[in-house]
Image: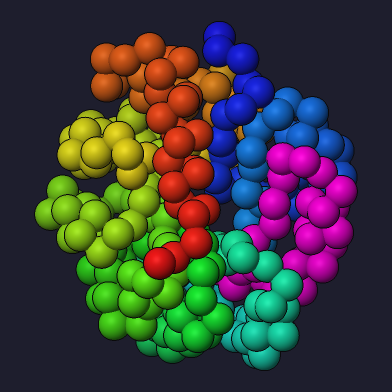
Amino acid sequence: MIATNGLVDFHCHLDLYPDHAAAVRESDDAGVFTLAVTTTPRAWPRNHELAQATRHVRAALGLHPQLVAERASELALWDAHLVETRYIGEVGLDAGPRFYKSLELQKQVFQHVLQRCAEAGNKVITVHSIRAAKAVLDHIEAYLPPTKGKVVLHWFTGSKSEAARALELGCYFSINAAMLDNERHALMVAAIPLDRVLTETDGPFTKTAERTSRPADVAVVVEALARFHEVSASTLAATVRSNLRSLLQPNE
């Protein structure tokens, strides 16, 4: 197994593990650059506090589309915290059966998020797009000019043509092991140039070897992606690090 130091987990819910502080320490000790996404603005202060004490963990300010129906009132709180971070997420749209009723409200919230990010400039946004790839891309195109921010599509399950459109809009993609285990999704992943690829676990919502994934398990993703693209794991890991550096370059 490839060493974890220098790997990237660009989407993980560290505050949803049984011991939040321990999960943050473990990620930092493993040397995995971990983006700790949040699902509500109320979760931001504690996530930010713990991440600030580390070298490798960063917190993202989110308002998850699956929680918009009950948490849209926290949008003003999201606005208040925006100045405190460069990283935004988890945000986006979810048109799955459980959340379709709130889709119009989700769209209003996502539009607001993108517009505020565009006004602030230089934000990096990790975006959820379950059954809503076209709507997500429509929003990005309409409300976030390429010079005003950068988008990473988390666990993207859209079509190859939607992936192509996302690439034209400047998006990156964070890939997890589950995506490679799905034949249709793997075909879409194959169409993504390696210079737009990041890695993620989406822990604790995924499993590695029948247990809950942790950021260090992103090594499994790196090795799977390396086999997929017929390159060495070390080459794939170096490519992802380079992509992360490019992503974090200030917008021109």
State yes or no: residue 23 in magenta: no
Q: Is residue 67 above or below residue 229?
A: below
Quadrant in the rendering for residue 185 = top left
Q: Position of residue 70 (x, y in %)?
A: 62, 81
- Residue stretch rendered in magenta on the structure: 40-64
Q: Is residue 16 visible?
A: no
Residue drawn at x 68%, y 67% as measured from the top left: 85
41 lies left or right of 170: right
31 lies left or right of 116: right
Residue drawn at x 25%, y 64% as measured from the top left: 169
49 lies left or right of 98: right
* The residue positioned farthest toward the left in the image shown: 161
* The residue positioned farthest toward the front in the image shown: 252
Quadrant of the rendering where the N terminus is positioned: top right
Q: Position of residue 167 (x, y in %)?
A: 24, 55
Q: Position of residue 137 (x, y in %)?
A: 28, 69
Judging depth in this view, the residue of 195 and 202 nearest the camera is 195
Q: Position of residue 196 (x, y in %)?
A: 33, 44
State yes or no: residue 55 in magenta: yes
Quadrant in the rendering for residue 82 = bottom right
Quadrant of the rendering where the C terminus is positioned: bottom left
Q: Is residue 48 above or below residue 175?
A: below
Quadrant in the rendering for residue 34 = top right
Residue drawn at x 33%, y 30% as measured from the top left: 180
- Give the total of numbered labels: 0
Residue drawn at x 24%, y 38% as measured from the top left: 193
